Image (tube, rainbow, N blue to C red):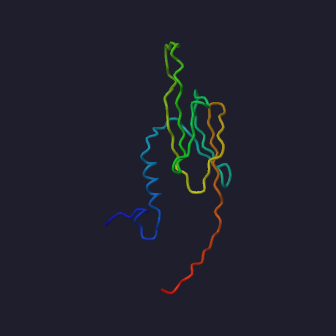
Amino acid sequence: MSKLTLGTHPYMLGFEQLERMLERSAKTGNEGYPPFNIEQTSRSSYRITLAVAGFSEGDLSITVEDRQLVIRGRQSDDMSDRVFLHRGIAARQFQRSFVLADGVEVGEAIMENGLLHVDLTRAEPEAVVQTIKIRKG
């Protein structure tokens, strides 16, 4: 017996791209850094919050690439004149990716107390009924 996937199920037409996005997001090695929260702020909006202590606004970039929200962080190396006796605060670069559904748009990003908040909104789908005319062949 063969395994049915979204792309091969006979009643699920055109979902191949969704299946590829799910596979791609499962393969991203985020490894838990930085930690983040996702909350639903209203019926049609969300907020992603990342703990980015030690990063400034200039160290972070937020892009949307192929229906993926990508947040990258890279701290500048201006610590060459500092001597650490102990260094326990991570200053490593990171990349976090979130797959966005159709209709989800990225709003504003706010940096506050070491937390980066990214607001998302989802457009309400319109009820569309389309009638297809049948022509004689």
Write the residue at 62% across / 73% down.
129
Q: Relative to residue 113, is residue 19 depicted above or below?
A: below
Q: Relative to residue 135, is residue 7 depicted above or below?
A: above
Question: The N terminus appears in which quarter of the rendering?
Answer: bottom left
Q: Where's residue 7, x and y in %?
A: 42, 63
Q: Where's residue 113, x and y in %?
A: 65, 31
The tally of labels here is 0
Q: Where's residue 109, x and y in %?
A: 64, 40
Q: Relative to residue 98, is residue 114 depicted above or below?
A: above
Judging depth in this view, the residue of 136 and 124 nearest the camera is 136
Q: Is residue 37 left or right of residue 42?
A: left
Residue most toward the front?
137
**Image quarter for residue 44?**
bottom right
Residue most toward the bottom?
136
Q: Is residue 54 left or right of residue 12?
A: right
Residue most toward the right?
42
Write the residue at 54% across / 83% down.
134
Q: Where's residue 54, x and y in %?
A: 58, 26
